[in-house]
Amino acid sequence: MYLDHFQLTRPPFEMSPDPYFFFPTAQHREALAGLVYGIGARKGFLVLTGEVGTGKSLVVRCLLDTLDKRRVACAYVFNSLLSPGEFLHYIAEDLGVTSGPCSKNELLLRLNRHLIESHRKGLTTVAIIDEAHHLDAALLEEVRLLTNLETPQGKLLQIALVGQPELDAKLETHELRQVKQRITLRLRLGGLSAPETFRYVEARLAAAGNSLPALFTPAALAMIHYYSSGIPRLVNTLADNSLLAAYAAGRRQVGVEMVEEAAADLRLRPVARRFSSFAREFAKIPRRSVALSASAAAANAGHFSTEAHGIPFTPEAQHEPDF
């Protein structure tokens, strides 16, 4: 609706986790690099947790785009509300193993044979389980048992659990201590800092074709961080609604009043810290540094790769036949 008004080529703040708009903060780069390394080095059991809206799904999408489909077979479980039997059948089917009506033992034998054959061909197999905080203890134990499929050289199946902080709490229970001991790498995502929020908004605007200077005033960006606590999903929602408010008012720049209006419509409550302290932080950020980061994001937009975003492949991953 507002694209022509602001001279944008595409919506800058859509909710879908599109790698085109990947903004590589230090923590997101670390999470993606950790997953790439863990899978490449056949570490077995990986865990990525973060609050709602912190970018876990986007990191997973970037990971799926990064993996070489010719050398990595991937099962992506996006519905974790499954019984142990349904879960095993889902993994098998997604990896191309004909499951059909069969007993659990027969299904595990077929899966094991498939994994061994894939390993002989130099392939790495990974199962990425999203929304893993919904997994109950019985299913988490089933996941653990899958990591018993191995050769003397390493695990045949890599497991990546992705979920909210409730997953961390589950893994700390005495009942799941065996699962916890199998975890070789734990990664976490949190909210963006105030300067990162500034650059995040500007970078997404640049990737969407923005050429107008200071489309959001510094105070408006400070207000977005104030109400969103740096959670990317909330930043997107607030920024999108603020642009809509500016468009409706016939304005070419988003000010504080538009952000406050959007926050009120979305019923968002600010954090306890006073807004003036956020405004002072944003005022310290040079506009030139923002412009440089935004132009870099625009240059990389639509061409996601670990190299383009500075994600290092480790020597272990390079020497493995997996990527």
Image (spheres, grey):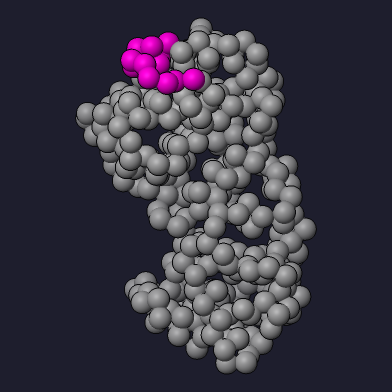
Front residue of 323/2: it is: 2
Residue drawn at 49 percent across, 73 percent down: 238
Q: Which residues are magenta?
A: 98-109
Residue drawn at 45 percent across, 37 percent down: 77
In the picture, the quarter occupied by the C terminus is top right
Front residue of 109/322: it is: 109
The relative height of residue 46 versus residue 106 in the rendered view (above or below) is: below
Residue 185 seen in this snapshot: no
The relative height of residue 82 versus residue 204 in the rendered view (above or below) is: above
In the picture, the quarter occupied by the N terminus is bottom right
Give the left or right position of residue 30, taking residue 163 as reference. Answer: right
On whether residue 101 falls in the magenta region, the answer is: yes
Q: How many marks?
A: 0
- Residue 22 coordinates in the image, percent (x, y): 62, 54
Give the left or right position of residue 241, taking residue 100 as reference. Answer: right
- Residue 298 coordinates in the image, percent (x, y): 74, 61
Front residue of 299/33: it is: 299
User: Residue 172 is drawn in which quadrant?
Assistant: top left
Front residue of 197/157: it is: 157
Residue drawn at 58 percent across, 67 percent down: 13
Q: Residue furthest top?
A: 152
Q: Residue furthest front?
A: 101
On whether residue 146 falls in the magenta region, the answer is: no
Residue drawn at 57 percent across, 92 percent down: 249
Give the left or right position of residue 117, taking residue 138 as reference. Answer: right
- Residue 215 coordinates in the image, percent (x, y): 66, 80
- Residue 142 coordinates in the image, percent (x, y): 33, 24
